[in-house]
Image (cartoon, grey):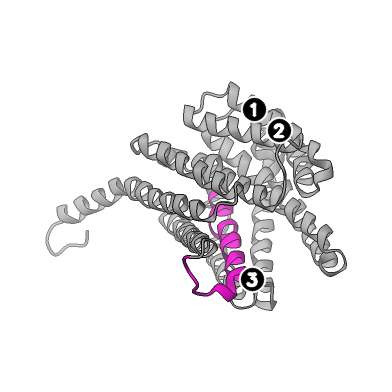
Amino acid sequence: MNTRSAAGILLALGATVLLGLFLRWQLAGAVALFADNFANLRRVHTHLGFYGALLPLAWLAAYDDDNALPRATGALYALFVLVAHVGFALAGYGVLAIAGSTGVLGTWLYGAWRRRRLVVDGDGWLSGAPLAIPVAAACIPAIAVTLRRDPSLSAGIVQSFLSVLVLGVLVPAAMHVAGARAPKKPWWIVAALMGAVGLGFTELSYLLLPVAALVLIAALRSRMDLLLRLLWLAFGVGAAAIALRLLPLDSGAGVAALHYAVLGPILLGLAWPYVERVHPLVPVAWVAAVVAMSTAIFLRAPTAAALTGSVVVLLLMVGVALILAPSFRASVRRTTASPEGSPP
């Protein structure tokens, strides 16, 4: 991953978690600033996480996409992300946000097309991602058509749209980077699409069972780090509980599950080649804080969620600093070792 890509992802990730923490404290009643704009700021938080951090990190870390797009396309993508989030902040789903999001989606589709050979040549994890992106894109017209006519149906399609991205792109990318043994093609992408339908429409929740089964099998059979294995085992058990309706799939549970999945096994899995360089207590503490925050969200305890969210943000800062420290020290050594008057 080149320096420019890494810097952009870290910037988006930092802005996402800081805004999320601000919103958590606002829900706890400690912050009144911008309270009237809460819905729009929440849209910025959610979309920036996907647009700016998670999807780019997945493509770069797992799908070796650093050179798959021309450099100008990367700059244009950053512009689309910026335009979309200025639009979300000012007017929600207005013209500016739609225009920027359309550009983001177009770049995703272009990237998927450039990686279309993964459908044939990729393993059981990676082969489905170029298909998941256009499937997710196909949900958008349906969302627009049903938004006013049938808001509940539209909300279900939105949930399925996000679930296609999570299950079809992010989860397999994190599994691949972590070294989990891949299922045979096309089992994962079929399970992911079924699971996305089950997450969008509670009466079909049992369709999430194949996802739970494949994740549990992969976690039990893999040689990945024990911490990652435990995270994925919990992911699989949670998916099975949702599928069997042992856990409610209401808004609170959905937000808690999304935060656990994204900040736990997915983000840690995607960044694992860097995470394993730091002291093992740091990722362990991070996981404990993520689990505590997700539990507080599930229990609808806003103050506890804000407090544990603060710990999550602090540990993220510590982790990133420890990961970047060796590169920074090496850069300083090169600079000081350069002859005086010559470029470093």
Q: Which residue range is magenta in the image?
A: 30-57
Res 6 quadrant in image: bottom left
Which of 80/158 is in front? 158
Q: Which mark is residue 108?
A: none
Q: Look at label 3 and name its amino acid.
A: Gly
Q: Which type of secondary structure does the marked residue at label 3 adopt?
A: helix
Q: Judging from the image, what secondary structure is the residue with disc 1 in?
A: helix
Q: How many marks?
A: 3
The residue singled out by tag 1 in the image is: 216
Which residue is at the front of the view, 213 or 4?
Answer: 213
Q: Whole-Å distance between the Cαs marked 1 and 3?
A: 38 Å
Q: Which residue is mark 3?
A: 100
Q: Which mark is residue 240?
A: 2
Is 68 in front, or is 311? 311
Q: Residue furthest left?
A: 340
Q: Residue furthest right?
A: 149
Most common SS among magenta residues = helix
Residue 187 shows in the view: no
Residue depicted at 28% across the width and 52% down the height: 328
Q: Residues within 10 Å of mark 2 (few under 14, many from 20)?
A: many
Give, as a three-letter code, the residue at label 1.
Leu
2 or 3: mark nearer the eye: 2
Residue 45 in the image: x percent, y percent?
A: 56, 62
Answer with mark 2 or mark 3, whichever residue precedes in sequence: 3
Say above or below: 57 vs 220. below
Residue drawn 68% across and 43% down? Answer: 167
Q: Nearer the viewer, residue 230 or 183?
A: 230
Is residue 14 magenta-colored? no
Dots 2, 1 in contact, CB < 8 A? yes
Amino acid beneath label 2: Ala
